[in-house]
Image: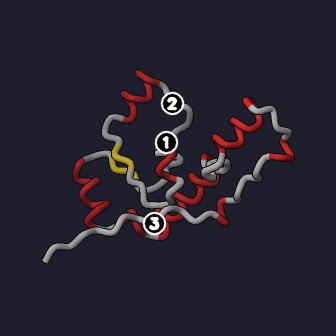
Amino acid sequence: MFDYANLDRPIVIYADDWEVYRQSRGVYFDLMAEPPGPVARTPEELAAVFRERAYADAESTALRAGFRARFCEFDDGRAAERVVRRVLLGEPPQALPPVLPLAERVPAPAAVTLVRS
């Protein structure tokens, strides 16, 4: 989910077992309180999200933007390079490429759906 958020594409959360998952495995944050898009808790809710295209509305876009701002600040495609250059090669911080701000990033385009006639 976090890596996919970098693509800035719609995300739908299907969490029919959220309470059990949270209690048995533990979580770092409350996904139900801060989701990256619409949340469905039942199969009927999930069908409604897709039927009504709730994943593509303004609220979903705003949720995704907030999620990306919180979790994707440094994921600009060069994070691993900065770690290698700093930690393994010992380069000074000023020699590393700066983090590209979220607003300036261009996510990979969505795959084109092939239509056969």
Vertical relation: 47 (above or below) 86: below
Marks 1/3: CA–CA distance: 26 Å
Disc 3 marks which residue?
A: 109
| Residues at circles 1 and 2 in contact by the CB criterion of under 8 Å | yes
Q: Which amino acid is tagged 1?
A: Leu
Provide the secondary structure element on which disc 3 rests. loop
Dot 1 crowding, Cα within 10 Å, few <14, some 14–19, many 20+: some
* Label 3 vs 2, first from the N-terminus: 2
The amino acid type, in three-letter code, at marker 3 is Pro
Position of residue 85 measured from the top left corner of the image (x, y, whole percent)? 74, 38
Out of 111 and 22, give the one closest to the viewer. 111
Disc number for residue 93: none
Residue that numbered label 2 is attached to: 27
Where 105 falls versus 16 (above or below)?
below
Q: Is residue 57 above or below residue 79?
A: below
Q: Give the x, y percent position of residue 2.
A: 51, 45
Residue 37 placed where, x, y %?
Answer: 45, 56
Q: Say which label, 1 or 3, has the lower sequence index.
A: 1
Q: Which residue is mark 1?
A: 31
User: In the image, is 49 to the left or to the right of 109?
Assistant: left
